[in-house]
Image (cartoon, grey):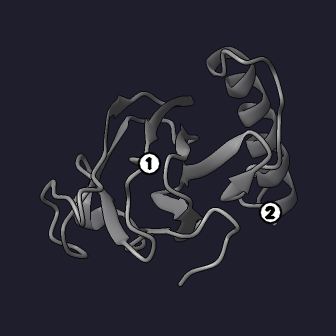
Amino acid sequence: MDHRTDPRRRAVRRRAAFALLACGLLASGCHPAEPTGNTSSGYLITIENYTFIPQHLEVPPGATVLVLNLDPFEHWVLSSAAPETYLYGTVNGVGFDTGPVPANAASAFSIPGSAPVGTVVPYFCQIYEGAMLDAPDLTVVAPDGGTP
């Protein structure tokens, strides 16, 4: 197996990158966490190999989401009003725009505290649009992790 695609090496690389970024970006201190959708220090979307990980992220109202770009080139994450439209939009008042996220860097956005539970917000990369390998979305869930 090619060392660049070995899932174990990719997981280690994501953990290390997240830990470094978390230390630098989170003003509350360094609390590195496993880079999946829900971490102890917040919520995480990882971009790697033109793919958003996880494809479906659940977050409560008021959550902050960290976008970690592990690709060797810039990405720019925007919400849209409908899947695969590639235009900025909001759903029930929930929208986000990371601005350009350089290679091996991160950006963050917040979900409004008034976001209605059950809201599903598709998002995309403004730079690569249809070249991304998935059609991800973010779902607003109740603070305990459940939906209505």
* Residue 139: mark in rendering: none
**Residue 143 image offset from top left, x and y in percent:** 63, 62
Per the image, label 1 sits on a secondary structure element best described as loop
Instruction: Between label 2 and label 1, give the one nearer the viewer.
Output: 1
Q: Residue at x 16, y 58 (%)?
A: 89
Q: Give the amino acid type for the residue marked by disc 2 in the picture.
A: Pro
Label 2 vs label 1: CA separation? 36 Å
**Dot placed on the residue nearer the N-terminal end, 2 or 1:** 2
Q: Residue 29 is drawn in which quadrant? A: top right
Q: Above or below — where is 133 with respect to 63?
A: below
Q: Give the amino acid type for the residue marked by disc 1 in the picture.
A: Gly
Q: Residue 23 is drawn in which quadrant? A: top right
**Residue 128 image offset from top left, x and y in percent:** 27, 53
Judge by depth and name the residue closer to the eye, 115 or 32.
115
Instruction: Determine which residue is flagged by label 2.
Output: 7
Per the image, label 2 sits on a secondary structure element best described as helix
**Mark 1, residues whose alpha carbon is within 10 Å: few (<14), some, or many (≥20)?**
few
Q: Which residue is drawn at 58% across and 41% down?
A: 70
* Furthest residue in direction bottom, as rendered: 148
Q: Which residue is drawn at 53% across and 44% down?
A: 65
Instruction: Determine which residue is flagged by label 1.
Output: 113
Judge by depth and name the residue closer to the eye, 99 or 4.
99
**Residue 75 image offset from top left, x and y in percent:** 36, 41
